Amino acid sequence: MRAAESSFGRPPKASGRWLFPLRMWYRARAWWRHQRISRRLTHVLGPQYRRSQELIEIDITYLCNLNCFNCNRSVRQAPEALHLPLEAVTSFVDQSFARGKHWRRIRVLGGEPTLHPAFFAIIEELRRYRRAHPGCLIEVVTNGHGEAVRSKLSRLPADIWIENSAKTGEVQPAFGPFNLAPVDDAAYRHADFRNGCAIMRDCGMGLTPLGYFPCAVAGGVARITGEGGGRQELPSDDDDMADLIERNCRLCGRFRDGHYVPTNLRPALLEERMSPSWIALYRAWWRKHKPGRPLPAVLAGEAAAPVSAPTASHFEKPT
């Protein structure tokens, strides 16, 4: 098997005569999402989404060679060369064996994962797991930017799949407004954040330098809030991680829409958008981690980006 682009679990792009009905369908789903996450319906129906037991994403580093607007790992907003130790990956593999875990897919992400100083050793640890479970897909998610990154990708074993977004700059029109915290929006005053979103089901649980989370995005949120890390051991299947979902989803812009919509059914995002909670959190992070350093422009002013009610225009593709 050659290293190639993986299409694992990816919905088709809307086109042609289906464009209008699909647009109406996703608008209806946006309306239902907003009703479904209310405390009243959640009390009756339970959380809308639960974390996957078969998929996991591993954020091995927050170091990146790009500074994309609206990064959902806060690489631009709070740059930090924080790596997941190789020993944590070894422990993950060992605990997966001990628990009899059958992962269908393990994704390696960042930041830019190829910048991890032990990148190839991490890949070999995951291949150690796959030798016992050959049906598991191991996938590297990369921005493909720069000769150094491309050189490392070319050296990956042929059985590792690559999702290469081939980014060339900091403006990413297909991104969503990660830094528009739903807790800052009056439209979400009745929301039960334990509902989470489709990312933890469709992309999987996350392992990050701060531990295990219901999704890797939540681990990125926790890095900034400092409110506590994730689980330090591989969670049991009956751990729904509701405390971590509620704590981190209240800040995550992906909660607002909750599920994937094709990129051509939502407008391009060409500017940085940030609500008051995130401005305050990033300013506090900079004071703690980079004292005396000038703030990024988006954090320097007093005004926050407007927060709007949920519409189909906010949908973002899961990681």
Image (cartoon, rainbow, N blue to C red):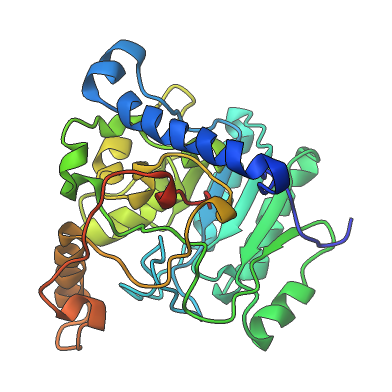
List x then y, in percent, for residue 212: 42, 45
Residue 36 falls in image quadrant: top left
* Extreme-top residue of the structure: 44
Q: Quadrant of the N terminus?
A: bottom right
Q: Is residue 245 left or right of residue 297?
A: right
List x then y, in percent, for residue 149: 65, 80
Comparing 92 with 295, the one in front is 295
List x then y, in percent, for residue 154: 78, 75
- Residue 8 in view of the camera: no
- Residue 69 in view of the camera: yes
Comparing 70 with 287, the one in front is 70
Instruction: Give the answer, above or below, for where 121 lies relative to 312.
Output: below
List x then y, in percent, for residue 8: 71, 45
Q: Is residue 42 left or right of residue 151?
A: left
Q: Is residue 158 left or right of residue 233?
A: right
Comparing 276 with 261, the one in front is 261
Instruction: Give the answer, above or below, for where 68 lies relative to 226.
Output: below
